[in-house]
Amino acid sequence: MLFNAEALTRLYYFLYLTRSFEELLIKLYAEKVLPEKPMTSTGQEASAVGATFCLRDDDYVLPALRTRGAFFTKGVSAREYLLEVLRKANGISGGRWTAHHLGDMQRGILLGSAVVGSSLPVAVGTALAARTRQTDQATLAFFGDGAASTGACHSAINFAAALNLPVVFVCENNRYSLSTPITTQTRNGDIAERAIGYGIPGDMVDGQDVIEVIHSVGRAVHRARRGDGPSLIECKTYNFRGHSESHHPDDGRPADELTYWRSRDPLEIYRDYLSSSGVRCEALRAVEKRVSEEIDEASAVAMSAPDPDPDNFVQCVFA
Ligand SMILES: Cc1ncc(C[n+]2csc(CCOP(=O)(O)OP(=O)(O)O)c2C)c(N)n1
Ligand SMILES: [Mg+2]
């Protein structure tokens, strides 16, 4: 898969937007403007952005807790996202959702769930629906290393494999589930190796390298579209800021581990790649300027946007 300069620059836009947008959420939380503590993907943006960069508009995404970049690559703007997390009337769901369990059906992003791992069987459902309707739509199902230890994860991958469904399971293995290290919750922290047990292809990639993620997920998406069934891809990554902004960023994590992973910042790695690919610095500065303008515009619009009308409280609520 070769990209032209325009696509390479667009990819930088999504990575930089995700980082900048989350910096905004952190700032708004510190200022007590954000109604909930942000759980960010700082340091692991390349897995969500890279994996969804391979998709078409009509493909499905089931995001996990930190798959924020996927919303931007699927077409959600900073303004739309911010309106929703500030619970404004003209947010994506009219302010009904939380920042971590958002969806946007227009863009094929199914609603996230607070119950870790529970979206994975739903991904099997969208894949089965695509097959039944005889479309070649792919489904991308994201999950964390903690979710990998749930029964729902096993059921979903096993069932998708048994039915040969067009779904790609993408594990964002950031080595921690809340403050539990991967070494404590499983004997084999290489989640991709489980693919052998399901009889499907598995691939372990450097989740800090967006190009590597794109190549691996791109191959798996092609397999899914061709009717060759599911794949399991594990992105080895790290979350620089810990579980949430109300947790201490170090959160008991060894200092040398943090230092090592901070030296493997996906944005830095991608900037080096762009420079060796001949993309000019000015093009990147232009992207950064555009993102900064979009973030400023999103803040200005969202802060002054109307709150939801209490009379519409139960609209769209199924009971
Ligand atoms: C079934 C269930 N168990 C526990 C929790 C509490 N919880 C919320 S996030 C989280 C960590 C999930 O870890 P992982 O899947 O690795 O995702 P990460 O936060 O690292 O992105 C936990 C345990 C939950 N929401 N649902
Ligand atoms: Mg994790």
Image: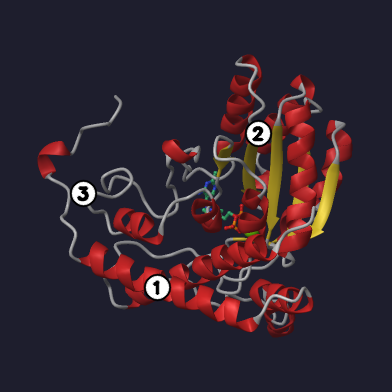
Q: Residues within 10 Å of mark 3 (few under 14, many from 20)?
A: some
Q: Amino acid at mark 3?
A: Ala
Tag 3's secondary structure?
Answer: loop
Q: Nearer the viewer, mark 3 or mark 2?
A: 2
Tag 1's secondary structure?
Answer: helix
52 is higher (above) or lower (below) than 11: above
185 is higher (above) or lower (below) than 37: above
Q: Quarter of the image holding residue 103?
A: top left
Q: Is residue 144 visible?
A: no
Q: Is residue 249 left or right of residue 203?
A: left
**For mark 1, what is the residue?**
24
Q: Amino acid at mark 2?
A: Ala
Residue at image coords 18%, 39%: 313
68 is higher (above) or lower (below) than 252: above
**For mark 3, what is the residue?**
89
Q: Nearer the viewer, residue 16 or 96?
A: 16
Q: Nearer the viewer, mark 1 or mark 2?
A: 2
**For mark 2, what is the residue?**
138
Q: Nearer the viewer, residue 262 or 275?
A: 275
Where residue 127 sits in the image (x, y, percent)?
64, 27
Q: CA distance from mark 3 to mark 1?
A: 20 Å
Where residue 83 sits in the image (x, y, percent)?
30, 56
Tag 2's secondary structure?
Answer: loop
Residue at image coords 60%, 74%: 240
In primary-sequence order, the first of circles 3 and 1 is: 1
Q: Residues within 10 Å of mark 1 (few under 14, many from 20)?
A: some
Residue at image coords 57%, 41%: 61
Where residue 120 sits in the image (x, y, percent)?
61, 36
